[in-house]
Amino acid sequence: MLKGFAKAAIDPATARNLRVEIEEFHAEYSAALDEGRIAEWPSFFTDDAVYRITGRENADADLPVGLVYCEGAGMLRDRALAIAKTEMFAPRYLLHCVSNIRVLAQDGEGDVAAQANYLVLQTLVDEKTTIHQAGHYFDRFVRREGRLLLRERHCIYDSLLIDNSLVMPV
Amino acid sequence: MLKGFAKAAIDPATARNLRVEIEEFHAEYSAALDEGRIAEWPSFFTDDAVYRITGRENADADLPVGLVYCEGAGMLRDRALAIAKTEMFAPRYLLHCVSNIRVLAQDGEGDVAAQANYLVLQTLVDEKTTIHQAGHYFDRFVRREGRLLLRERHCIYDSLLIDNSLVMPV
Amino acid sequence: MLKGFAKAAIDPATARNLRVEIEEFHAEYSAALDEGRIAEWPSFFTDDAVYRITGRENADADLPVGLVYCEGAGMLRDRALAIAKTEMFAPRYLLHCVSNIRVLAQDGEGDVAAQANYLVLQTLVDEKTTIHQAGHYFDRFVRREGRLLLRERHCIYDSLLIDNSLVMPV
């Protein structure tokens, strides 16, 4: 469990409706990444969002260091652009599979903390499909114009040995 | 994204109900294949259904060629029978895991276009469980006597190197 | 399919509500195991619960022998304690991914039979994330004080070669 993402009492019906919405969010987010629509990626976040990919060891020790750290829409867009414009990594197919969604808490302003499992499969040319990265999302969602957006996404991976060409968001 | 499977505006409540039904469909379909009930496989399709397994490279280039192509109930039943009656491949266990369901569109006649991720795990005797095939389903469902049936199923796999004993439907 | 877990007629709306609840159960159960909260594990079961991990070959042949067999809360707590107190196995991260939930039947007393796919990923220090065990849960749930509990959990794994340090519950 990530600090700040404890499970709190929440009305079961509210939690269920939120879970359905969050499941839809994950499916749209994953599809954008799987289809290479990287320019759309920042649109899943608020303007002041924090995005981080870090290992479970670091997260457990409450260390902020990670493989990727973005703060704010500008950094997210920079990253998306960098990926779209560079081709310094081999072409690959990615498949994001999300399961085990848990709605953890809802605060007074309606922000929703939630968790999910992710499994990113990678296929490189002439290679078998492999497990690229597996871990947990720890998310904080807010509602803007009826739509859920990420104010925080912490991707905490179990995988200790990660392909060093990790440039793609998760 | 597969041609003909663009995301269109759809009433959120309708989309949610459909997603639940489609999730049930996937669970039943997968269970039939995992349990080796291959003779039941054609019963998930309409009489005029199209079933196809093809690589993402071909799909992206809009090329119809695939590893498997069936058109109509007769071809589906032929294929099911061929698999049931031949034993030219080593015994194996398959596990179909479906996630990331997206309801894409509903047309005027009620046909529903949807997408999902699939991950087929394979276990051969005396071998570890491996990723056999991973990819996306692109489906067109119709309702017959209250039940969803597939009029089209396109299995678009990421996996470029596929075990050449691919005889089983996905 | 496991003996005693046949699919029976069940009201669709009831089945859907149960499936949502069971999905929540799996997410909580998996999170407890993934986070190493092993002492909580027995709290997901009734006092007279049966817990079993066995291979699909044995299950198909209706043989009861398995890798793990617990009957009753005492044996479950013993096992949890044994795992918590021993460190005779290398540290590892586990990730339980559950999908393809099927509500199979509900009996006159309200007990619910259900099935799901599980995929346990394992990460050992300095190794890549691998598929540790993949298979099906066959569960019998009862409701106690508004909450679902397992009266039976049969973990039937496809994986024939299992890491012989299998001490953790699934």
Image: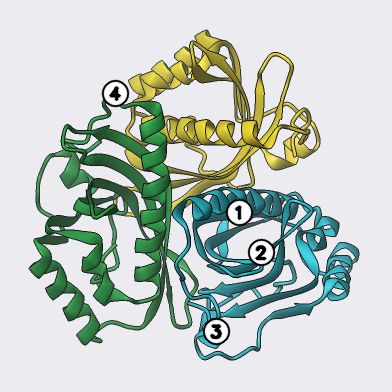
Chain colours: A yellow, B green, C cyan
Q: How many marks?
A: 4
Task: Please give the chain letter of the residue carrying mark 1.
Answer: C
Residue C16's spot in the image, x, y percent?
A: 50, 50
Q: CA distance from mark 2 to mark 1?
A: 9 Å
Q: CA distance from mark 2 to mark 3?
A: 20 Å
Which residue is denoted by mark 4 in the rendering? B9
Query: Is the residue at mark 2 from the same chain as the one at mark 3?
Result: yes
Marks 2 and 3: CB-CB under 8 Å? no
Task: Single out the mark in the foreground, 4 or 3.
Answer: 4
Task: Please give the chain letter of the residue carrying mark 3.
Answer: C
Q: Residues within 10 Å of mark 4 (few under 14, many from 20)?
A: few
Q: CA distance from mark 2 to mark 4?
A: 39 Å
Q: Residues within 10 Å of mark 3 (few under 14, many from 20)?
A: many
Badge 3 amino acid:
Ala
Q: Is residue C36 above or below residue B12?
A: below
Image quadrant in which the N terminus of chain A is located: top right
Query: Is the residue at mark 2 from the same chain as the one at mark 1?
Result: yes
Marks 3 and 1: CB-CB under 8 Å? no
Marks 2 and 1: CB-CB under 8 Å? yes
Label 2 vs 1, first from the N-terminus: 1
Task: Please give the chain letter of the residue carrying mark 2.
Answer: C
Which residue is denoted by mark 2 in the rendering? C141
Query: Is the residue at mark 2 from the same chain as the one at mark 4?
Result: no
Q: Residue at x 26, y 68 (%)?
A: B41
Judged from the image, the secondary structure of the residue bearing numbered disc 3 is helix
Badge 4 amino acid:
Ala
Which residue is denoted by mark 3 in the rendering? C59
Which residue is denoted by mark 1 in the rendering? C22
Q: Residue at x 70, y 72 (%)?
A: C166
